[in-house]
Image (cartoon, helix red, strand yellow):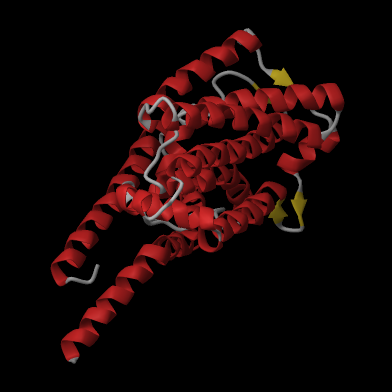
Amino acid sequence: MTATTDSVTRFDRGRLWTRFGIVFVLVALWVVGVAFVPNFANPDNLTSILRQSSFVGISAIGMTMAIVAGLFDLSVGSTLALAAWASVLTASATGSPLAALLAAVAIGIVVGSINGFFVTVVRIPAFITTLGMLFIVAGVTLILTNGAAARYNGPEFIWWGNAALGFVPVPFAVFIVCALAGSAVLRFTSFGRYLFAIGSNAPAAHVAGVPINTATFLVFVVVGIFVGMSAMLLGSRLYSAGPGLEAGFELNVIACVVLGGTRLSGGRGTIVGTVAAAILFTTLGNLLNLLHTDPFVQRVATGLVLVTALSIEGVRKRLAERTGSE
């Protein structure tokens, strides 16, 4: 009886760490920042952290769904640049934030649909397909823009990226709404269950009647929708957008998802972890900036955090396998 109780306790602790471990790390990092880093606790600085975490975080929600299904989308960085450019250009032509959002989301849907088509119909692995699309979309962006950025600073448009609702930045409020929607999809819809089933065991999911091709196609479209939303908000924040926007964005998005506890091989993941990881990454960069750390050292520190997180997950998994708790 005692052995059984110990096993259950280890299992509960393992699940608790998997779901909320990154939240504990984030809280600890904020406590250290408040206690030891000058100006970290300044309200403007904390607002800036929440705002900056939103742009990568919204895209990471869609990427969480993809990785839960054992898929990747490496084209999100170039898609972000093209969608943000289209968003700013549309806003300058129409003056409408809604039109700008629709333009950005439309770009995301088109790229996502192309990715989904090649993965499900042509049967090219997602990694290869989206890597190719990364270069294709980047090239298309250069051709359409001729290397120049679109600019627009209409008040209704830039409000979305720069305003705040009380102490909450508008982009962060959108981020939380997107996170709640993404979490609801994963937990309470058949589509979400399909993604977990595909990521856990695709052959078994097929035998069970899961529409693998349909779910795979749709998840790439969903990723594109979230990237489009990020693009519109980022264009609004910067008043401009063009080629080369947010270099390395796709790696930052994937890093947030993985650090948040989503298993790279699929079958497990939480939106809560992704949200906390996005804030944690932004917080880490903010702390290093406040400490006047060299930008190159900051990249090394970010990489070390990711490697450490993955190492902890690997060790935890091996221990769980030995104790039979997972």
Q: Is residue 318 left or right of residue 99?
A: left
Q: Residue at x 55, y 59 (%)?
A: 189
Visible residue check, residue 262: no
Locate residue 174 relative to residue 185 in the image: left or right. Answer: right
Identified at 42% across, 65% down, the residue is 20
Image-quadrant location for residue 301:
top left
Residue 156 in the image: above or below residue 1:
above
Residue 86, image x, y percentages: 69, 23
Query: In this rendering, would 228 be left or right of 103?
Result: left
State the residue in front, 49 or 245.
245
Q: Quadrant of the C terminus?
A: bottom left
Please identify the quarter of the rendering in which residue 55 is found.
Answer: top right
- Above or below, 92 against 139 in this view is below
Q: Is residue 136 visible?
A: yes
226 vs 294, nearest the viewer: 226
Spot occupied by residue 5 in the image (x, y as percentages of width and height): 24, 87
Write down the quadrant of residue 52 in the picture.
top right
Residue at 34% x, 52% y: name it. 207
Task: Give residue 82's position: percent from left, percent from top.
Answer: 61, 23
Between 110 and 206, the one nearer to me in the picture: 206
Quadrant location of the N terminus? bottom left
Residue occupying image coordinates x 24% and y 52%: 311
Q: Residue furthest left?
A: 322
Q: How many marks do you count on the picture?
A: 0
